[in-house]
Image (cartoon, helix red, strand yellow):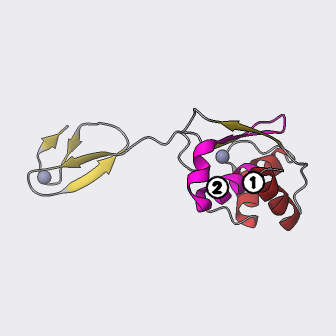
Amino acid sequence: MNEIEEYCKIIINKYNLPISMPNIEINYKRHRIRGTAMYNGTLIISDCIFEDKSIFKNTIRHELAHFAAYTENGFGHGKTFKKWAKLMNVKETNFSYTRKKWFHFSCECGKKWKARKKIKIKCTCGKLLF
Ligand SMILES: [Zn+2]
Ligand SMILES: [Zn+2]
């Protein structure tokens, strides 16, 4: 039994999850995505989660919450997922799978802010910025 399977077993037992042990696949390439809970019961885990113990734990909890939500037809990060995630003490319920980076803006007047997109912004001082 590998480290991932061991932790899955602990969490499944601890929270009495209505799921069986997922089939685990490790992905060595796809680093932007930490984990994917496939509807067919396969858990795909990126090898980058081994770099940090808390990421490792949280990613597995997060994905197991998906499997638990699937049993109630809960997809994505909706209400059913959130219910399980809360119960299972998942730290990040919607983490950076495809999270876009922030663009930082600043104006000559000193005001700073950030946005998900590069957009035309009018500063409170009246200056138009890009
Ligand atoms: Zn998720
Ligand atoms: Zn300004």
Magenta region, mostly helix, strand or loop?
A: helix
Marks 2/1: CA distance? 10 Å
Judged left or right of residue 109, residue 95 is right
Q: Residues within 10 Å of mark 2 (few under 14, many from 20)?
A: many
Name the residue type under label 2. Answer: Phe
Marks 2,1: beta carbons within 8 A = yes
Number of the front mark, 2 or 1: 1
Judged left or right of residue 24, residue 55 is left
Quadrant of the rendering where the C terminus is positioned: top left
Pick whichever, 30 or 41, lies toward us: 30
Name the residue type under label 1. Answer: Glu
Q: Which residue is mark 1?
A: 3
Query: Is the residue at mark 2 in contact range of ligand 1, meaning its CB lies under 8 Å from it?
Result: no
Q: Residues within 10 Å of mark 1 (few under 14, many from 20)?
A: few
State the residue at coordinates (82%, 51%): 68
Q: Which residues are magenta?
A: 37-65
- State the SS at label 2: helix
Q: Which residue is mark 2?
A: 56
In the rendered structure, find residue 27 and report the number of the disc placed on it: none
- State the SS at label 1: helix
Q: Position of residue 36 (x, y in %)?
A: 69, 40
Q: Position of residue 49 (x, y in %)?
A: 60, 50
Q: Which numbered disc flags the more N-terminal residue, 2 or 1?
A: 1
Judged left or right of residue 71, residue 58 is left
Pick whichever, 110 or 34, lies toward us: 34
State the residue at coordinates (12%, 49%): 126
